[in-house]
Image: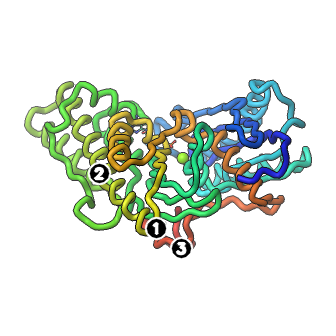
Amino acid sequence: MAIPNSQSMTVLGIESSCDDTSVALIKHKANIHPQVLSLIVLNQNHLHKQYGGIVPEIAARAHSDKLDYCTIEALRQANSKVHDIDLVSVTAGPGLIGGVLSGVAFAKGLSWGIGIPIVGVNHLAAHALSPGLTTECHFPYLCLLISGGHCQFLAVLSPKEYRRLGGTIDDAPGEAFDKTARHLGLPQPGGPSIEKLAKNGVSDRYHFPRPLTGREGCDLSFSGLKTAFLREVEKIHGTTGSVSEQQQADLCASFQKAVSDTLRIKSQTAITQFETQMKQKPTFFALTGGVAANHELRGSIEALCHDNGIKFYAPPLKYCTDNGAMIAWAGLQLFYLGQADGLELQARSRWPLDPNSRPLLGFGKKGAKA
Ligand code: AMP
Ligand code: MG
């Protein structure tokens, strides 16, 4: 990547597109890895718990309440002052519009107040570029982005150019983990709860589908899997009146294995598609997003990459879930490529990374979501 001068850049990254308010300060100098000076993440789980899902209005208010605190804290922990910041980078979409607006408005105020440039970042691009925070990754590479709201295979061609090879046609895997956990009355977020119980379970006790694996292409579906899980829980309730601890563990292990098998099989298809479309084999496979925290899944995709002679990398968990550091890093790379937005920067609820890809879900009057 061409870096304009030998000076270092200090970037403030702001994330508020879903239910995490996060602000980070990173520093970067040519030819060395970026340094994350501080990272603040305030989760809103406690505010949404009683509603069984994220309430957009509550999320937006909580973001605008906490953004100034998070920024002050990020500066304090980095032992820095507001005038040390060279660039403000902010998630400008896709996401819950109230939250995105809170972040964008805050970032504009800050950039105008201290007279520094602002860069609006696509949240999905920031996930796809997040491996660069902690490792060397050369373009083009293959990325599987799996989180609470997203699921896509991407060929990452440059910080501003992506090709979507496939994605979910309904639920994201994190959403499936969360809803499945809810059926068993387990704490949210559901992914870690399921993974914990699955450790004591037998993964072939219950037979769940591996959706769309018999079809060509690398699109995915998790909605039917979630329903199959609910049916099994109802069946057990119907016969024994309750679900024993061992049955819960076996259900979780079988579900987790079904998700992991499905993603492994489709990852193989994505590797082949990448090779066909890019006319070169991927040398690097990045697993990003919150669901990448799952050890069974990491192990399975890592083994697949090993068999294909591809380097596997999943960033540390704090950079996998929604965080300001990945926003700062993505914004800086765009800035190096000449992007600088002004006060006209718009917040977008929908913002597909690959504008040429066909819509998978959420396609309405305003176009594809992500
Ligand atoms: P994100 O949307 O990137 O912030 O990630 C949050 C999502 O990741 C939630 O849906 C979680 O349930 C999911 N998640 C977090 N940890 C795990 C895990 N160990 N296994 C599976 N899913 C997980
Ligand atoms: Mg995310």
Q: Residue at x 76, y 27 (%)?
A: 78
Three-letter code for the amino acid on which mark 2 is drawn: Thr
Choose top left, top right, bottom left or bottom right for residue 83.
top right
Q: Is residue 64 left or right of residue 302?
A: right
- Sequence order check: which comes first, mark 3 or mark 1? 1
Q: Amino acid at mark 3?
A: Asn
Q: Quadrant of ligand 1?
A: top left
Element at label 3 = loop
The label shown at residue 356 is 3
Residue 179 in sight = no
Q: Could you tell me the amino acid type at mark 1?
A: Lys
* Disc with the residue nearer the chain's start (1 vs 2): 2
Disc 2 crowd rating (10 Å Cα; few below 14, some 14-19, many 20+) is: many
Residue 234 position, x and y percent, is 17, 42
Question: Which is closer to the viewer, label 3 or label 1?
Answer: 1
Mark carried by residue 279: 1
Per the rendering, the mark at residue 262 is: 2
